[in-house]
Image (tube, rainbow, N blue to C red):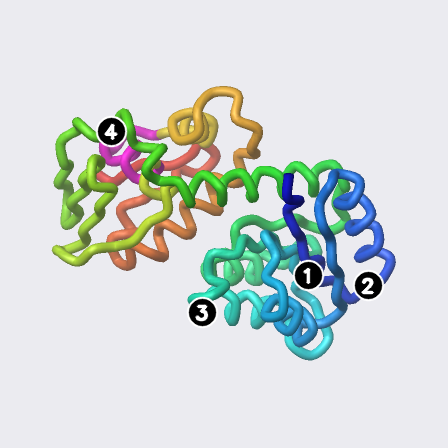
Amino acid sequence: MIKQSVLVVEDEEDIRELVSYNLLKEGYQVAGVASGEDALAAIESKPPDLVLLDLMLPGLDGLSVCRKLKGNPLTELTPVIMLTAKGEEADIVAGLNMGADDYVTKPFSPRVLLARVKAVLRRAAEEHRPEEDYENLEEEEAIEVHDLMIHPGRHEVLVRGKSVELTATEFKLLYLLVQRPGWVFTRQQILDGVHGDNYAITERAVDVQVVGLRRKLGAAGNYLETVRGVGYRFKE
């Protein structure tokens, strides 16, 4: 079996070695660099399956690295997990809006970090197989709500007649919510509806996916409403 590869971008040597050690123990191929410039060079030379990206880096910071990765057609699908100090909410939001897949706050538990890595890699693998995710949706009729047209059988979303490309997870999340406009879904209900029961992924992943979905839908993303302390709903 080919080992999945992870690039650890962290300027603090102790943290980089700790993270690398734990990833190696789990069977991943691991490379580590200490700067944003070195990260881009390493990714160009040998693209990893996932990037663990510290935000506070010398020279080119983590947000700039993420922007360059997601803006390059060759690396835009490479999953990115941001490593960030607590309280950097603005940076977290900026990173998620750029397409980062998850974030882990420092200080962090190596076990939690490994769980996040596994979940993001699993989600990325699923999203590369959308044809396997919609066997039960092929016979469903298209849904038209507000200025959205959602066709499950074709995995197609139109916003005011213009096609929007979504990942498999984003599509299933949107489809789940639009079937019951105004109904509030908890994060756990969304996880169960999108991934199935007992899926090993944290509820925070729902927030990440909603941010990405809103960004892709543009103005129509405002139909996805946050219900504080509960979850999300699609606006009636």
Residue holding disc 2: 12
Q: Which residue is mark 3?
A: 71
Residues at circles 1 and 2 in contact by the CB criterion of under 8 Å: yes
Q: Looking at the image, do the residues carrying marks 3 and 4 touch, with CB atoms under 8 Å apart?
A: no
Looking at the rendered image, the quarter that the C terminus falls into is top left
Which numbered mark, 2 or 3, is in the foreground of this view? 3
- Looking at marks 1 and 3 on the same chain, the residue that comes earlier in the sequence is marked by 1
Name which quarter of the figure residue 180 lies in.
Answer: top left
First-in-chain label (4 vs 2): 2
Could you say which disc has been placed on residue 137 in the image?
4
In the image, residue 63 sits, relative to residue 205, either above or below, namely below
The kind of residue tagged 2 is Glu
Mark 4–mark 2 Cα distance, whole angstroms, equals 47 Å
Disc 2 residue crowd, few under 14, some 14–19, many 20+, Cα 10 Å:
some
Q: What's under tag 1, amino acid-wise? A: Asp
Q: Which residues are magenta?
A: 173-184
Q: Nearer the N terminus, badge 1 or badge 2?
A: 2
What label sits on residue 54 in the rendered view?
1
